[in-house]
Amino acid sequence: MAEHDCPSTSNEKTEDEVPPAKKIKVIADHKKEKLEERLNYILSCTVCLDLPSSVCMQCCHGHLMCVGCYHHLLADGRLKDEQATCPSCRVDITRGSCIRNLAVEKAISELPVQCSFCSGVFSRSNITLHERCECNERVVKCRFKQLGCHWSGPAHELDRHVDSCSHSMKSPTELLQCLNSINSQQQDQAFVTAVEQHPSNPTLSAERGLTYQLLLKSKISEPLEIDILLLRAPYDDVIIEAKPCYTRFTSDITESTLEPLKTRDVNRLLGSKVINIRLFMFQHKR
């Protein structure tokens, strides 16, 4: 029998029978990465060029803005006495013309993101819970940090450290001495907290703030002493830190001192047409 007439054995495979599994997998992964990059670009905010982390707003032409940049544009327009406009199409931006885009918010929440500790991939809606509570590689501090322990390390090593921590074996007298020492150190330190939520966003300013002052319009014959308390307006979700202030009016002093308005929603208040705040005044009786 000729060589070309020999039938092939059962162990031999032709080229059509060899499945190119690895090649198909590589191409699929490559397309997936390109799709994620395109979605990140399409769904990003037109102001800070980052994906919105919570509420997503859009102008009447469909250009997206995160809620922080949206309030900042309204606040800038009010401070400059100008009409706020969309940075993409220059259409007017008002509270009545812009709407919330729920579909984009849901799409962003399902986009994959990598954990900064274990490099695992999770959806954006679950990454915060994972990094704060579930990841075994997240950096945690010792349970006795308030007593002076400076240990920090992966979460899976915390129990082993606590068993050997020297602060867990101290007597009540030694623990009281540690607490007194820490309290004295905290009184000598000044803590500064920044309200800037996006350090990479040049449109947000940590220096912007609001102050308030009371003016006495009527005439008084004797000093008037009152306590002032500012709270958020009814049916409003602007968070205002309740801090009472004392002021004393006389016939010569008719203006109270400038007091800061403790809130992180400064841009939101400035962007509103009317600032609604609830004011309580308590008079000191002699």
Image: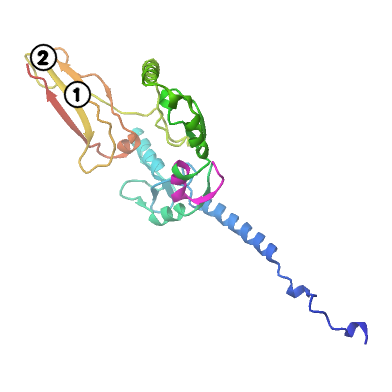
Residue 200 shows up from this direction: no
How many marks the image carries: the answer is 2
Front-most of residues 185 and 36? 185
Instruction: Residue type at mark 1: give it.
Output: Leu
Q: Earlier in the sequence, mark 1 or mark 2?
A: 1
Residue in the picture at 39% in, 40% down: 73
Residue located at (21% from left, 38% from top): 233
The residue beneath circle 2 is 223
Q: Is residue 276 left or right of residue 132?
A: left
Point out residue 50 in the picture as x, y percentages from the top left corner.
Answer: 49, 44
What amino acid is labelled 2 in the image?
A: Pro
Q: Quadrant of the N terminus?
A: bottom right
Q: Is residue 269 left or right of residue 53?
A: left
The spot of residue 190 in percent (x, y) is 39, 19
Q: Residues within 10 Å of mark 1 (few under 14, many from 20)?
A: some
Residue 11 position, x and y percent, is 79, 75
Question: Which segment did they paint magenta?
Answer: 117-132
Judged from the image, the secondary structure of the residue bearing numbered disc 2 is: loop
Q: Quadrant of the C terminus?
A: top left
Pointer 1 residue = 214
For the point 23% across and 24% down, the residue is 213
Please tell me whether residue 125 belongs to the stretch shown in magenta.
yes
- Marks 1 and 2, how far apart at CA: 15 Å
The crowding category of the residue bearing disc 2, from other C-alpha atoms within 10 Å (few below 14, some 14 to 19, many at least 20), is: few
Q: Which residue is at the front of the view, 72 or 181?
A: 181
Q: Check if mark 1's residue and mark 2's residue have beta carbons within 8 Å.
A: no
**Residue 263 falls inside the magenta stretch:** no
Helix, strand or loop for disc 1? loop
Q: Which of the 4 quarters of the picture holds residue 224?
A: top left
